[in-house]
Amino acid sequence: MSGAAAKEPHVPVMLAECLAALEVQQGRWYIDGTFGAGGHSQAILEAGGSVLAIDQDPGARAFAERLNISKGSEFIFLQQNFRFLDSLAKQSRLAGVAGVLLDLGVSSMQLDMAERGFAFRQDGPLDMRMNPEGPSAAEVVNSYTQDELAAIIYKYGEERYSRRIARKIVEQREKTPFETTGQLAEAIAQAYPPGYRREHPARRSFQALRIYVNDELGALEDALVAAENILADSGKLVVLSYHSLEDRIVKHFIRNSSYLKAESKKPLLASDSEITENPRARSAKLRVARKLSEAKT
């Protein structure tokens, strides 16, 4: 991570609401499954809780080191995917935690770093991996069949023009393989029909590729099961999601769980004032559930 990036951390979304939902207690342990720049973790620590922070992005370690210096034994950071949070908690000798916080999706830090390849508005290597292992977005768009690409873009981006976009990608790569985000964004824009657009035509396709490359929905499903397993009785599950695919998984998991009870039927939304200050909060949905000591009847 560059020095510039380290000085401009991601602003945590709905921080006050997350803290209130967690009901932080002095000396109890909480898991921040998506550490990022550490905004949520630091707030939990300041409220008196202890934190096991998890993040698969290598760039998060620089922010974790700052908290390690000031918080010592009250703070543990592990570079790993949050889908393993129950085993990571046990590895850290934590048996039954008071709360699990998951802030889903890509952070503004990652979007702002062109070299990470997440953003369609900045030209950079076509990567999109949160963890530098596994196939990159470039490998996917340059090697998958047209039908496979269309399926990914439709399923994970809910993109109505997925077939047109996939066809354009295949046509373009036969001339020149895709190497940068700018090349891909331009090809997608050319595949779109003319007319007024409320959003950039590449937004949904980039979302789809990012979710697929990082197996984000599969990781979320695993993390929810893991959170339910590791939470102590009356422990809180707090999840911030930013698009319908994530929110649907969280809502259905809580509803179908035998040991989690939703705190409210509808998700909490960010205030108008927060949205004005932090536009990323506009699409945020916060769902909260409590771990029951006995199975629901």
Image (cartoon, rainbow, N blue to C red):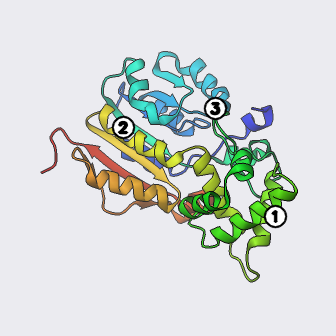
Q: Secondary structure at mark 2?
A: helix
Res. 63 image quadrant: top right
In this picture, residue 127 sits left or right of residue 246: right
Q: Position of residue 186 (x, y in %)?
A: 81, 64
Q: On the image, numbered disc 2 is attached to which residue?
A: 227
Quadrant in the picture for the N terminus: top right
Residue at mark 1 to residue at mark 2: CA–CA distance: 40 Å
Q: Of marks 2 and 3, which one's residue comes earlier in the chain?
A: 3
Res. 30 image quadrant: top left
Q: Position of residue 47 (x, y in %)?
A: 44, 34
Q: Are marks 3 and 1 in contact (CB under 8 Å)?
A: no
Residue found at x 53% / y 24%: 77
In this picture, residue 97 sits left or right of residue 156: left
Q: Of marks 3 and 1, which one's residue comes earlier in the chain?
A: 3
Numbered label attached to residue 178: none
Q: Residue furthest right?
A: 175
Q: On the image, numbered disc 3 is attached to which residue?
A: 60
Q: On the image, numbered disc 1 is attached to which residue?
A: 186
Above or below residue 9? Residue 161 is below
Q: Which amino acid, by three-letter code, is at mark 1?
A: Glu
Q: Which amino acid, by three-letter code, is at mark 3?
A: Ala
Res. 235 image quadrant: top left
